[in-house]
Amino acid sequence: MSRTFPVALAALLVACAAQMVTSAQAQSRREPEPLDITITANRSPTAIQRTGSAVTIIRAEEIARASSYSVADVLRQVPGVEVSTNGGPGGTSTIRMRGANSGQTLVLLDGVRITDPSGASGEFDASLIAPGIIERIEVLRGPQSALYGSDAMGGVINIITRKGRGAPSRSLRFEGGSYGSASVTGSVAGSSGPWSYAFSGLGQTSEGFSSYGYRIGRLEKTRGPFENDGLRRLTGLGRIGYDPGTGFRLDLGMIASGRRSGYDAAFGAHPDTKSISNQRFGQFHARAELDSFDNRFTHSLQIFANRTERVLKDSFLSGGPPPTNFRTDYEFWGNRFGAEYQGTLRLDRFGKLILGARSEREAAASANQDIGPFPGSRSKDFSGRQDTNSVFGLWQLPVGERLMLSFGTRLDQVSDSRSFATWRATAAYNLPETGTKLRASAGTGAKSPTLYQRFSPLYGTRNLRPEDSLGLDVGIDQGFFNNRVTLSVTGFRNRFRDLIDFQFAGCPPAQPFGCYFNVARAKTAGVEFAGTFIAIERWLAITGSYTYLHAKDQRTNLTLARRAPHQGRAALQITPREGWLIEPSVIMASSRFSSANETNPLKRYARFDVHTEYALNSTFKLHLRFENITNARYEEVRDYGTTGRAVHGGVTATW
């Protein structure tokens, strides 16, 4: 990739902007459109039209049309986001943004990070959260460590659960379908006086299909038949709010989730194993806000805690003869708790100033025990903890009526490790007469070494440096014909240094089996497109997204694993009559490599789905979801199966 890429791309976008502005000037002046509000982009409610970052908001109705079993399917429609799943409904789903590693995307649940502290790479498993409890998702692309600290190198995904508002409402949703799948979700929400409440419960089951080898011809012929890897999940959620109108507000939230799923070893003489994963997750947060000085200075204090428990009942069949079944239980615990203060000072024509501090402790441990064929005693693998203390600031500065600038910085100090400082700057320039927004952002990202990378007795390296990155993007959002056509184009470039990798050579004598080192470097660049075309008002709309990605390992100049150069989604939204929606969609990805050093190639694919829903009346709505209608055979991860032709349907009652 040429070093002139950022300059050329900026020139191209400016030229496109000029052309769009020229053509748009012929449009008649229109009334201002309602403003979309993002919380994640600037740590406080801000109109998207006033943010210089690339932000996508996924609303409840869009989430409801996606899969009921994994938030991963919801995120596939976002430009710049790539998802890969190891198998069926209970398979591990990893997320990458703009070519960054999966552990370099920060995922928040109601503003609290939810990655498992005991995980080796600190990545978020998207199958952990069921879509049925989500009200909206905000996806903020580009390095955001200046706002949120460690992990936010590729971007931030903020999953926001339901809150109560207005008159009491209740809903029940039932769904069943292929692979023995069944799901039920119930909720009640509303407000009374100063109090608001929202409670949800969810139960899901699926017989699923084999994680290893399902619908992969070369494996079914030589290794089949395979056993199913199913899923069982229970989730409960509660939020209570208090707002007496005096400038004081309180929000309390709690979630508890348990999941049992099958998985396969996917290697060895018998890769289709009867292994079971049991996982539990719980989180609590309390947030209090107080307005002072005639609402000019808002104080916010949040305390939070979450815990993840994983038990892997690993079953491995040796080659033999005769084959021997080795069974081992692996246990993992991860705890996180802390507090954060944020002060928001409104300065009128001088904008808004945010100052804050955060203190967080992470602790993790793991153990294992051989169960068969020779039972053993339980032994501890590793344990560790670290404290992270941070201070941060963000200044949003309006310059006239059209230009909004922001400048942010943050310092994170990790106990017994190196501190790191990060920064971010953004600019948004609006031309309301033509529906044009020009935007740009630049910043740095960082990721602290995980507890396992530091404290594992076998592989850990205590003095690892934080990973760091530098990223920039420039883009344009343009509306035409009273916003019947909207187009968003973003070009980006990222540089990653001091990436933590595992290697066998060059390790201390006490680590003969390998160790972690800061050895890797990478660069990514690309272009993101998203657009909407309302072809026939209230009858037909066309939506689409596309990402071009160039992602290279700088040591080898080879393409990074599981990064498709081209991927996208296109959908039609057909409304034959009021209350009836038909949405056919196609997800596409080009050929790519499942493993490092351009090994284990994966073929390109296109998957065709159709969702339809029909409102019988104000209470009942029917829905059907047809997945992979053409029965396309494809892999997202080498040797792991994907769904065949499937159908799911159900009914939602709201009253």
Image (cartoon, rainbow, N blue to C red):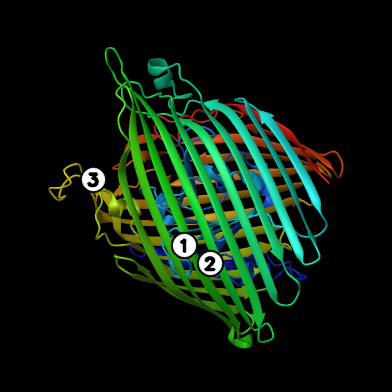
Q: Quadrant of the N terminus?
A: bottom left
Q: Which mark is residue 458?
A: 3
Query: Where's residue 115, x and y in %?
Result: 46, 52
Circles 3 and 1, Cβ within 8 Å, touching? The answer is no
Quickly name the residue at label 2. Answer: 53
Residue 502 falls left or right of residue 313: left
Sequence-wise first label, 3 or 2: 2
Circles 1 and 2, Cβ within 8 Å, touching? The answer is yes
Query: Where's residue 190, x and y in %?
Result: 78, 56
Query: Where's residue 640, x and y in %?
Result: 43, 31
Of 589 and 166, which appears nearest the observer?
166
Q: Please tell me whether residue 380 is drawn above or below residue 446 in the rendered image.
A: above
Regarding residue 434, the answer to whether it shows in the image is: no
Query: Where's residue 631, x and y in %?
Result: 56, 26
Q: Which mark is residue 142?
A: 1
Sequence-wise first label, 3 or 1: 1
Mark 3 or mark 1, which is nearer to you?
3
Q: Secondary structure at mark 1?
A: loop
Instruction: Give how far apart the Cα atoms at labels 3 and 2 are.
Output: 41 Å
Instruction: Give how far apart the Cα atoms at labels 1 and 2 are.
Output: 8 Å
Of 173 and 454, which appears nearest the observer?
454
Callout 2, which amino acid? Ser
Residue at coordinates 81% horizontally, 54% vertically from top-left?
Answer: 168
